[in-house]
């Protein structure tokens, strides 16, 4: 099988390693079936060819696409430039892509729709998601219930459906929870890789990054422990099953 290219944006090693382990577990992948690049540490090789991969998976991170360029730390600028540099070819070729959380902002921004903190940001918690009519017909969502919970936590969000996209999953707190461009390019606002333990770790790591009031960390950890969130992982597993190729 050709490997999946896993691009990670988190500069915190503990969070990055845990996210990568979650991608492997939830996607049903072994490490040797992926090519992992931590973009905070390593640039995308100039000779990288998408033809060498089954698909691309992009993780989340503390950066925001909608922040003013001049206010972004240098590492965030490098990460964003690297991801944005791949999007024209990915979308033009309809190459298999799964962008998780930050990936929603990347895809939406690339396609010319608005990403901002104006509306639809969600505090760390569980979004009550529902499949749209298009979502009920999408192969990545074929075995998910019509309503399910998913872990979220983001400051910015897509303010409108990007051109050329199908709207697959919605929620009362953020309408654009999952979209598809063409037939193979996907983005989720929720975290399909996340489980309670992983989100508890992120709460501890990012408690002072503006996602929630630091004094609320224990309350949010207790919430994560009380929730049963397992449906979103099927999105990753279905992505891998659908697009894995020799």
Image (spheres, rainbow, N blue to C red):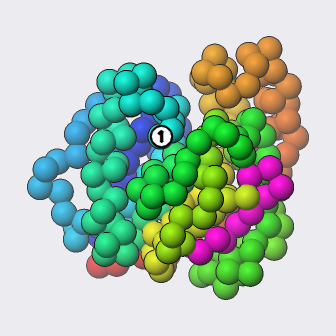
User: In this view of the protein, which residue sits in the foreground, 149 or 170?
Assistant: 170
Image position of 152 (left or right of 63): right
**Residue located farthest toward the left when viewing the structure as drawn:** 47
Name the image quarter holding residue 146: bottom right
The residue to which callout 1 is attached is 65
Q: Residue at x 46, y 69 (%)?
A: 185
For residue 41: magenta? no
User: In this view of the protein, which residue sits in the foreground, 190 or 193?
Assistant: 190
Rendered location of residue 241, percent (x, y): 49, 75
Image position of 13 (left or right of 89): right
| Badge 1 element | loop
Rendered location of residue 179, percent (x, y): 59, 66
- Crowding around mark 1 (Cα neighbors within 10 Å: few <14, some 14 to 19, many 20+) is many
Task: Please state the extent of the stretch shown in magenta in the rendering.
Answer: 166-174
Mark yes or no: residue 100 visible: no
Q: Residue at x 74, y 74 (%)?
A: 132
Rendered location of residue 120, percent (x, y): 72, 46
User: In this view of the protein, which residue sits in the foreground, 117 or 167?
Assistant: 117
Q: Residue at x 74, y 36 (%)?
A: 124
Rendered location of residue 213, percent (x, y): 76, 19
């Amino acid at each position: 099988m050709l490997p999946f290219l896993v691009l990670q944006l988190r500069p915190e090693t503990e969070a990055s390693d845990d996210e990568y382990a979650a991608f492997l577990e939830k996607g049903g992948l072994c490490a040797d079936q992926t090519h992992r690049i931590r973009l905070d540490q390593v640039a995308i090789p100039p000779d990288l060819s998408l033809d060498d991969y089954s698909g691309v998976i992009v993780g989340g991170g503390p950066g925001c696409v909608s922040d003013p360029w001049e206010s972004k730390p240098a590492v965030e600028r490098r990460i964003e430039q690297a991801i944005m540099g791949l999007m024209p070819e990915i979308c033009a070729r309809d190459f298999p892509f799964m962008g998780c959380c930050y990936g929603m902002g990347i895809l939406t921004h690339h396609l010319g729709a608005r990403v901002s903190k104006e509306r639809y940001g969600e505090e760390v918690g569980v979004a009550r998601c529902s499949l749209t009519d298009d979502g009920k017909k999408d192969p990545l969502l074929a075995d998910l219930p019509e309503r399910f919970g998913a872990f979220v936590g983001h400051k910015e969000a897509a303010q409108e459906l990007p051109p050329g996209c199908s709207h697959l999953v919605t929620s009362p707190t953020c309408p654009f929870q999952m979209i598809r461009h063409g037939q193979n390019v996907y983005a989720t606002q929720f975290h399909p890789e996340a489980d309670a333990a992983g989100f508890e770790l992120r709460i501890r790591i990012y408690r002072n990054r503006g996602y929630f009031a630091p004094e609320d960390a224990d309350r949010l950890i207790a919430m994560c422990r009380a929730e049963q969130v397992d449906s979103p992982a099927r999105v990753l597993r279905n992505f891998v099953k659908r697009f894995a190729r020799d």
